């Protein structure tokens, strides 16, 4: 192998290791980085499909009894009654919060820590709130997106009591994978990047599993991404990396139908 080839290989390995490190959901005391960095408070009812999961992740209501989240937030496919979903409130301590317990997990087949970062959680009792449509084509994989979550508001910061939101612009696969950005670590079929070259606004630890969405041509919200990973939070040339929902839309629908 040429010297340049060896350097490129090393750089790619380094990027993958970084990705693996920042994939961990933050539920433990140590580093619970902030939820949405550079965000502002969401209004009560603004994003009624937002779900907080008890392991410290976000999610979205796919149906009244199914929550869409990230594979790295959950364990293996099978029966699981350990997760509580909280919805219907921006304030997690509100007495009007609606909660429901999990009965089953469906984790993306073949998930191994890279790409395919989606999962479904079946709920014991329905949550009767508006659901979030998922993008079934690539048509909306561009433009300005909204992200929201109760994750850290600064890298390394605490989880949040109130739902935060922010807007982030689409970043092309080519830019996102370029040398001074993620240098090839983004699996472009499975992942979509969003954020500013200068950083400053981003999802962060504890936002994982939550939706990235925009409005469709009818003016309805449509989910294009699932919070997956990033190198730190809101760092320059290190945008948030999101599961590309359009790639998995038919698999998600088929799986939901079995739950
Ligand atoms: N993996 C993180 C979590 O489990 C989400 C990281 C998102 N990072 C970012 N820079 N957008 O909560």
Image (cartoon, rainbow, N blue to C red):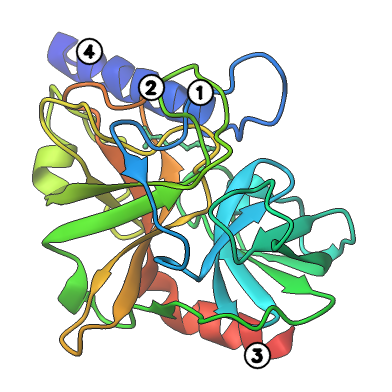
x and y, in percent, of residue 225 in the image: 36, 60
Left or right side of 128 for 148: left
> Label 2 to label 3, Cα distance in Å?
36 Å
Which circle's residue, 2 or 4, is located before the other in the chain?
4
Secondary structure type for disc 4: helix
The residue positioned 72% from the left and 24% from the top of the image is 28
> On the image, numbered disc 3 is attached to which residue?
257
In depth, the one of 18 and 54 nearer the eye is 54
Secondary structure type for disc 1: loop
Residue 33: numbered disc: 1
Which circle's residue, 2 or 3, is located before the other in the chain?
2
Secondary structure type for disc 3: helix
Would you say the beta carbon of the disc 2 residue lies within 8 angstroms of ligand 1?
yes
Left or right side of 75 for 130: left
Residue 232: numbered disc: 2
> On the image, numbered disc 4 is attached to which residue?
7
């Amino acid at each position: 192998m040429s010297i340049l080839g060896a350097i490129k290989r090393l750089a790619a390995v380094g990027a993958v290791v970084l990705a693996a490190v920042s994939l961990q959901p933050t539920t433990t005391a140590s580093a619970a980085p902030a939820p949405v960095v550079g965000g502002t408070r969401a209004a009560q009812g603004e994003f009624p499909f937002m779900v907080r999961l008890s392991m410290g992740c976000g999610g979205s209501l796919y149906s009244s009894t199914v929550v869409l989240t990230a594979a790295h937030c959950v364990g293996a496919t099978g029966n699981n009654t350990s997760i509580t979903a909280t919805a219907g409130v921006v304030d997690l301590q509100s007495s009007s919060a609606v909660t429901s317990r999990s009965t089953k997990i469906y984790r993306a087949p073949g998930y191994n820590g890279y790409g395919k970062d989606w999962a479904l959680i079946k709920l014991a009792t329905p949550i009767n709130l508006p659901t979030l449509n998922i993008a079934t084509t690539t048509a909306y994989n561009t433009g300005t997106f909204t992200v929201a979550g109760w994750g850290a508001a600064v890298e390394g910061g605490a989880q949040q009591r109130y739902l935060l939101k922010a807007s982030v612009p689409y970043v092309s696969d080519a830019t996102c994978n370029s040398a001074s950005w993620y240098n090839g670590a983004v699996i472009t079929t499975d992942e979509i990047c969003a954020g500013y070259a200068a950083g400053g606004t981003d999802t962060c630890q504890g936002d994982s599993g939550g939706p990235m969405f925009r409005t469709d041509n009818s003016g309805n919200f449509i989910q294009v991404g699932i919070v997956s990973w990033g190198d730190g939070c809101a760092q320059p040339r290190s945008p948030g990396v999101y599961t590309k929902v359009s790639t998995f839309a038919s698999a998600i629908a088929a799986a939901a139908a079995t739950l």
